[in-house]
Image (spheres, grey):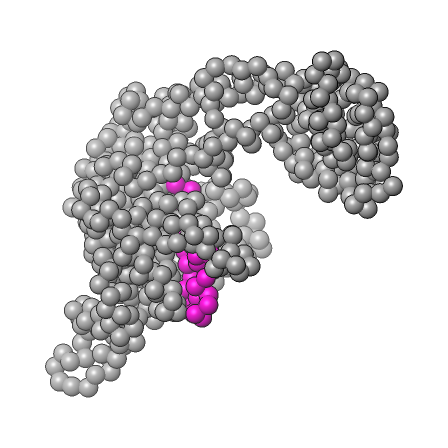
């Protein structure tokens, strides 16, 4: 007798007075079946494992349960029924005996391969939960949930945290900064305030929390002109170093560890106010049934302080586009107080300008600093939607077509994260049907997906990026005439871009965009600040990568910066070639030097340029660096 290709064995369960059909699972299929047990890193209970083999190997399990339910007057002993069935199954499927199973280094349950265990493997029966009974498992889950509740309850608002004030000397401005000294027990309350996508955003946040009157500090830096000469992330790193000396537990690594405890699916287990009797349901099934969706974050929930500081926060990372940032933030702040149509998106913007000047970066930074969540950016590459039929991928196939029940890329993403920044990259490359969908988003603030579900965009920021107008600006340079006819001004650029947009997009499309923001071409001072920032990242990478050179220090003089500017800047591509130039001319040559020569791991390497080539000078004694006249001159230039 066979069922679904498996050999079937009949067995009479005497305690239940019922004949069950036991499937003999081929050894080749066993590991596919065991894949179901990929939960809790393999730390499953014996009772859960028995549930698994009974449901997997008994072909008529539903009939057995119905039969037992009918015997209400004289019910069988369920514990004995369970033991009898489990023994019968293991008699037919001997490889499913728990002693034949191991948990490998990836926490996957597998069949034992021979008598010897491989490195990282451990027997299934040795896991910490194996001998927990149903009751013990339920109590353990209850206690764990209570522990989570208590931990959540300890998280306090920043304004309620106790702190002392200590003074630290900041050499760059030759002044003391007043810095808050928090208690280590409040670490989670501080680091759980937001999700950090990178180290720079983390350091900026810590500075804003720890420095007393941080806004006054930023204003002073602007008045002194320091923020115009030195890239803001470098300034934030220096001040963060002072904050970390006083609060050594406020590290990016600790923030990452805390964020790893968050469920990527943003689900949370329902909290029960009272203790319930343990059920016969396994903990896995119970946790699945108790999950509920975490309340979605909305625009109206943003603190006023975050909105007021949004412009400053973006300018820390986006260099040379202050005017564009101001226009963007002005529109978002207007929307925050209700001065917008309640059904339309928070804001809709078209970022125009040549490549490599910060349009895409502005979108990413806005998402990080406005939403401050793990899933905050939805990017649609419009070059993938140039054909008319491609638009269906955004909202899902129409009813009746294959895949219509799966929804669309864009609509599914908005349903999951309604408060997001949606970027239509290179919007001019999309087909007119995509533009029609976008017109519906801009006008009505919603789309209907292939399943017929209306999807609201009222908590989304819509950004379109475009290179339209670049060729028209280049044509101005070729104009023949007298005086300033061929001179490019910002007014001429704006006019050329506006004319190009009118040729490409319909008036009803452009009229529904809140603002067309023209990103200006970067000047030399902007590029030099970007070079400072990219070179600073090399030192940062050395410190944060676990290699023998993490204590190495790099010093960059003005000559290497000018060398990178001459060789890494192409106006047609903006700042994009800078990274490639630094990788080729600095990082690669430095790596070869470290591999070929015996460089002390705590040395200082001075990076310069001579006769058109980068130079590297190793100084073993750090004090020697500060004694040289060359370093003193470099320090003056960096200030």
Q: How many marks?
A: 0
Q: Is residue 163 visible?
A: no
Query: Going 47% across and 32% down the picture, which residue do you hit?
Result: 292
Q: Is residue 492 visible?
A: yes
Q: Position of residue 218 (x, y in %)?
A: 22, 41
Query: Going 53% across and 15% down the picture, which residue do you hit?
Result: 276
Q: Is residue 433 above or below residue 461?
A: below
Q: Quadrant of residue 99?
A: top right
| In-image side of 107 versus 81 (left or right) | left
Q: Which residues are magenta?
A: 373-396
- State the residue in front, 200 or 92: 92
Q: Quadrant of residue 402?
A: bottom right
| In-image side of 132 versus 95 (left or right) | left
Residue 624 shown in magenta: no
Q: Position of residue 456 (x, y in %)?
A: 34, 48
Residue 388 shown in magenta: yes
| In-image side of 146 versus 110 (left or right) | left
Query: Going 43% across and 37% down the picture, which residue do you hit?
Result: 252
Q: Position of residue 500 (x, y in %)?
A: 26, 73
- State the residue in front, 390 or 478: 390
- State the residue in front, 179 or 481: 481
Query: Going 46% across and 42% down the picture, which residue do you hit?
Result: 543
Q: Quadrant of residue 476?
A: bottom left
């Amino acid at each position: 007798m066979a069922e679904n290709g498996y050999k079937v064995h009949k067995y009479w369960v005497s305690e239940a007075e019922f004949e069950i059909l036991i499937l003999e699972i081929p050894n080749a299929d066993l590991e596919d079946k065991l894949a179901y047990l990929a939960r809790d890193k393999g730390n499953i209970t014996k009772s859960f494992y028995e549930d698994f083999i009974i449901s997997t190997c008994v072909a008529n399990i539903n009939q057995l349960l119905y039969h037992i339910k009918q015997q209400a007057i004289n019910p069988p002993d369920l514990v004995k029924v369970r033991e009898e069935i489990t023994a019968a199954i293991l008699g037919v499927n001997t490889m499913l005996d728990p002693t034949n199973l191991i948990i490998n280094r990836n926490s996957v349950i597998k069949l034992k391969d021979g008598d010897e265990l491989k490195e990282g493997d451990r027997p299934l029966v040795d896991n910490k939960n194996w001998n927990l009974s149903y009751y013990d498992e339920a109590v353990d889950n209850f206690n764990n949930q209570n522990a989570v509740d208590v931990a959540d309850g300890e998280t306090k608002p920043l304004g309620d945290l106790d702190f002392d004030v200590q003074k630290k000397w900041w050499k760059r401005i030759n002044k003391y900064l007043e810095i808050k000294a928090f208690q280590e027990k409040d670490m989670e309350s501080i680091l759980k305030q937001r999700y950090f996508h990178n180290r720079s955003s983390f350091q900026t946040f810590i500075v804003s929390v720890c420095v007393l009157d941080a806004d006054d500090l930023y204003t002073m830096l602007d008045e002194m002109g320091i923020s115009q000469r030195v890239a803001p992330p470098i300034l934030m790193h220096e001040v963060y170093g002072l904050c970390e000396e006083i609060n050594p537990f406020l590290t990016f690594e600790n923030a990452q560890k805390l964020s790893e405890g968050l469920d990527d699916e943003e689900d949370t287990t329902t909290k029960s106010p009272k203790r319930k009797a343990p059920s016969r349901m396994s903990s896995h099934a119970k946790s699945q049934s108790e999950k509920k969706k975490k309340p979605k974050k909305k625009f109206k929930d943003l603190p006023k302080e975050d909105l007021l500081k949004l412009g400053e926060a973006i300018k820390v990372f986006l260099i040379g586009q202050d005017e564009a940032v101001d226009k963007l933030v002005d529109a978002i702040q207007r929307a925050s107080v209700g001065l917008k149509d309640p059904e339309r998106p928070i804001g809709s913007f078209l970022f125009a300008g040549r490549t490599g000047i910060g349009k895409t970066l502005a979108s990413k930074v806005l998402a990080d600093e406005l939403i401050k969540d793990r899933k905050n950016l939805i990017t649609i590459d419009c070059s993938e939607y140039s054909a008319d039929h491609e638009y269906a991928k955004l909202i899902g196939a129409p009813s009746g077509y294959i895949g219509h029940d799966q929804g669309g890329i864009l609509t599914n993403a908005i349903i999951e994260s309604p408060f997001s920044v949606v970027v239509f990259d290179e919007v001019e490359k999309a087909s007119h049907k995509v533009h029609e969908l976008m017109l519906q988003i801009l006008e009505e603030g919603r789309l209907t997906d292939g399943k017929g579900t209306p999807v609201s965009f009222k908590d989304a920021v819509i950004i379109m990026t475009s290179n339209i107008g670049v060729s028209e600006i280049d044509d101005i340079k070729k104009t023949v005439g007298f005086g300033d006819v061929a001179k490019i001004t910002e007014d001429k650029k704006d006019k050329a871009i506006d004319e190009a947009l009118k040729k490409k997009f319909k008036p009803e499309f452009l009229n529904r965009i809140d603002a067309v923001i023209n990103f200006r071409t970067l000047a030399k001072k902007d590029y030099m600040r970007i070079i400072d920032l990219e070179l600073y990242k090399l030192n940062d990478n050395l410190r944060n990568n676990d290699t023998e050179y993490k204590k190495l220090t790099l010093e960059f003089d003005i000559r290497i910066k000018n060398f990178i500017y001459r060789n890494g800047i192409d106006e047609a591509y903006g700042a994009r070639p800078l990274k490639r130039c630094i990788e080729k001319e600095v990082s690669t040559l430095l790596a070869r030097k470290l591999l070929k020569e015996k460089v002390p791991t705590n040395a200082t390497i001075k990076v310069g340029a001579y006769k058109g080539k980068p130079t590297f000078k190793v100084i073993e004694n750090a004090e020697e660096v500060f004694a040289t006249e060359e370093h003193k001159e470099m320090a003056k230039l960096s200030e």
